[in-house]
Amino acid sequence: MAEDLLGWTEIDTGTCSVARAVEILGDRWTVLVLREVFNGVRRFGDIQTHIGVSRSVLAQRLATLKEQGVLERRPYQEPGDRVRHEYRLTPLGRGLQPVLVALNNFGDQFLSGPDGPPVLLRHADCGALVSAALVCADDHRVGPREIRLELGPGARPRA
């Protein structure tokens, strides 16, 4: 394993895909906002009430997610009310679904209470439970000790 990591300490981690993804996810509230939008809660007041976040923190997280291209604001209007906005996932935002499923699976496996997980994720077509899995490009399931690090074309030397 040490051989596999030989080049890792030599490269600039500023180009790391994990670091770039964390720039989007940022903190707890951002992940919870994304969970809400994935689960169909798209309106400011509904998100705020459901996760118990302050208006200012929620406004900031939504603005950041919009700025990063993860969410877009769309107008809606209830009869007799003024125009308001709801938040929808962009293609970039939908790309985060496997991350949220993996976090959900982790929580279910290691952090659930004695009664088990509060929510089950099921495949809409067959009803089987959904889980995030490591799969190679040839469709083989991959265990955590079966991954080899290789520097890619975006790797840059550390200054």
Image: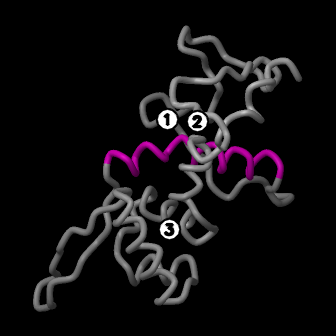
Which residue: 55% across, 50% down? 21
Ranked by sequence position, the earlier of labels 2 and 3 is 3
Whichever of labels 1 and 3 marks the residue nearer the N terminus, that label is 3
Q: Nearer the viewer, residue 18 or 16?
A: 16
Q: Could you tell me residue 70's position as x and y percent?
A: 38, 57
* Mark 2 to mark 3 CA distance (whole Å): 21 Å
Looking at the rendering, which quadrant does residue 66 occupy? bottom left
Say how many tags the image has: 3
Is residue 50 a member of the stretch shown in magenta? Answer: no
Earlier-in-chain disc, 1 versus 2: 1
Per the image, label 1 sits on a secondary structure element best described as loop
Residue 99 falls inside the magenta stretch:
yes
Q: Amino acid at mark 3?
A: Val
Residue 117 locus on image (x, y percent): 72, 54
**Residue 33 badge:** 3
User: Residue shown at 48%/82% (left/top)?
Assistant: 48
Extreme residue toward the top, this view: 138
Asked if the residue at tag 2 contacts the one at tag 1, i.e. Cβ–Cβ closer than 8 Å, the answer is yes
Q: Is residue 110 above or below residue 87?
A: above
Q: Residue furthest front?
A: 159
- Rendered residue at 58%/36% (across/down): 130
Q: Quadrant of the C terminus?
A: top right
Q: Nearer the viewer, mark 2 or mark 3?
A: 3
What residue does disc 1 label? 123
